[in-house]
Image (tube, rainbow, N blue to C red):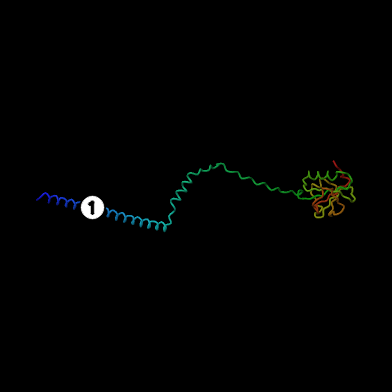
C-alpha cells in the first residue's frame, strides 16, 4: 500500500472520529437541554400544585408569623408592679339625724338686738343645721312660742324642750309679720318650726 493511500485512510478515520465525537457532544448537550427543560416544567408544575394545596388548606402566613414573633421578642417586656393598686374606699353616706332634717326659723320681736342670733347658735350647738333668723313685727309674749303647722305638739324634739322648757307649743303656721334682714333672706317658704322668742328668753350673750 502506498504512503498516499495510508495518509488518506488515516485522514478519513480522523474525520469520522471527529464526526462521531461531535455527534456525541451534540447528543449530550441536547439531552442535557431536554432534561433540564423537563425538570423546569416539573418544578413549575410542583410549585403550582403546592400553591393550590396551600390555598385549599388555608395555611397561616409563615413569613407574617415569623415577623410578629420577631417584633414581640424585640419589644421590651413591661415591668409588672407586684404590689396591687389599692382601691379607694367609698366615702360613707352621712345619715342625717332627726334634728338635722328639720328647718327652723327664729323670730325676734323683743326689740333687743342679737337675740335671734344668740338662739341660732344655741340650736346649731344642739345639732340643728337648717336655722334661719328674722324679725317678728307682731306682739311678742312673755313666754317663747314654738309653732308648727305640719307637726303635732307632742312631736317636738327633745332638743327644743331642753332649750325652751317653758315654751308654749302651738299647732299653727306663721305667715305674717316676718321680716328678713337684707342679705339674709331665706329661700324657704315653709319651716318645720317657727320659734318666737319671748321676753323671758330675750338673751343675746
Q: Residue furthest front?
A: 4
The local secondary structure at tag 1 comes to: helix
Q: Position of residue 117 (x, y in %)?
A: 83, 44
Report the quarter where the C terminus lies.
Answer: top right
Of residues 2 and 27, the one nearer the viewer is 2
Q: How many marks?
A: 1
Query: Is 60 left, or right, of 186 in this rendering?
Result: left
Q: Residue furthest left?
A: 1
Within 10 angstroms of label 1, few (less than 14), some, or many (20 or more) residues? few
Q: Position of residue 126 (x, y in %)?
A: 78, 44
Of residues 133 and 65, the one nearer the viewer is 65
Of residues 124 and 49, the one nearer the viewer is 49
Query: In the image, what residue occupies the spot 23% across and 52% down?
Result: 22
Q: Position of residue 97 (x, y in %)?
A: 74, 48
- Where is 93 relative to 51, above or below? above
Query: Is 184 left, or right, of 34 in this rendering?
Result: right
Q: Position of residue 153 (x, y in %)?
A: 82, 52
Q: Residue furthest top?
A: 205
Residue at which label 1 appears: 22
Amino acid at each position: 500500500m502506498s504512503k498516499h493511500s495510508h495518509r488518506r485512510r488515516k485522514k478519513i478515520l480522523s474525520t469520522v472520529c471527529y464526526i462521531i465525537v461531535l455527534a456525541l457532544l451534540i447528543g449530550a448537550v441536547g439531552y442535557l437541554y431536554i432534561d433540564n427543560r423537563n425538570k423546569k416544567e416539573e418544578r413549575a408544575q410542583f410549585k403550582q400544585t403546592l400553591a393550590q394545596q396551600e390555598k385549599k388548606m388555608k395555611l397561616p402566613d409563615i413569613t407574617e408569623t415569623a415577623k410578629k414573633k420577631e417584633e414581640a421578642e424585640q419589644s421590651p417586656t413591661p415591668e409588672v408592679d407586684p404590689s396591687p393598686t389599692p382601691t379607694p374606699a367609698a366615702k360613707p353616706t352621712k345619715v342625717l339625724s332627726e334634728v338635722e332634717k328639720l328647718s327652723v326659723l327664729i323670730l325676734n320681736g323683743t326689740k333687743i338686738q342679737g337675740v335671734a342670733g344668740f338662739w341660732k347658735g344655741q340650736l346649731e350647738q344642739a345639732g340643728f343645721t337648717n336655722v334661719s333668723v328674722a324679725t317678728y313685727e307682731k306682739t311678742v309674749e312673755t313666754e317663747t312660742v314654738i309653732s308648727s303647722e305640719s307637726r303635732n305638739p307632742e312631736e317636738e324634739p327633745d332638743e327644743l324642750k331642753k332649750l325652751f322648757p317653758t315654751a308654749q307649743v302651738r299647732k299653727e303656721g306663721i305667715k305674717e309679720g316676718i321680716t328678713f334682714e337684707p342679705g339674709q333672706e331665706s329661700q324657704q317658704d315653709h319651716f318645720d318650726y317657727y320659734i318666737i322668742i319671748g321676753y323671758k328668753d330675750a338673751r343675746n350673750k
